[in-house]
Image (tube, rainbow, N blue to C red):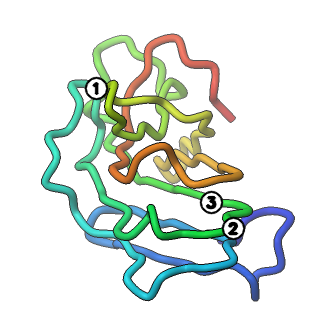
Amino acid sequence: MAIPGYDSSNVAEYTLESAGARVDLVAGVVPDGFGLEKSVSEPSADSLAEPVDLVACEDLKAVEAVRIALVYDPSKLPPGASPTDVTVAVETDEGWDPLHSTVDLEETTVTAVLNDRPPGSTIVAAYEEGDDSSE
């Protein structure tokens, strides 16, 4: 699935099916080494999937758009939690930061669209209590 508003011929697509992760991006420079791999980072306590690393993310230049889509496991939601309170979270120096995200309940995916690189290179689908990012 391409990034809305962008010509699909300008969108680079990367998938790590084993982790249920997909990244689409529009950037002036995408390094040959860019891609996705399973992370060795410990998942956050609120993780609903295993973390994924964006390899060579810091080498992206002239980024116009990044779309991150992650499959999550709804059975990992806390009891009584809303399935719409799922977010894409990125690991930063301060911890896991949620990104504005939308949830597809039928596909059990969560998606974030950014106009720049994410603030870190490790991402995960996570539960965020009281988040209003549902679709």
Gap between marks 2 and 1, in whole Å?
32 Å
Where is 54 relative to 100, above or below?
Answer: below
Disc 1 residue type (three-letter):
Asp
Residue 47, x across and y down, in percent: 28, 34
Disc 1, SS = loop
Q: How many marks?
A: 3
Where is 41 relative to 27, above or below?
Answer: above
Tell which tag, 2 or 1, sits nearer the viewer: 2
Residue 87, x across and y down, in percent: 49, 34
- Structural crowding at the residue carrying mark 1, measured as other residues with C-alpha within 10 Å and reported as few (<14), some (14–19) or many (≥20): some
Tell which tag, 3 or 1, sits nearer the viewer: 3
Gap between marks 3 and 1, in whole Å?
23 Å
What residue sits right under mark 1 in the picture?
Answer: 46
Going 40% across and 16% down the picture, which residue do you hit? 81
What residue sits right under mark 2 in the picture?
Answer: 62
The answer to whether 6 appears left or right of 104 in the picture is right
Where is 64 relative to 91, above or below?
Answer: below
Q: Nearer the viewer, residue 94 or 105?
A: 94
Residue 73, x across and y down, in percent: 31, 43
Disc 3 residue type (three-letter):
Val
**Which mark, by number, is residue 66?**
3
Q: Quadrant of residue 124?
A: top left
Gap between marks 2 and 3, in whole Å?
11 Å
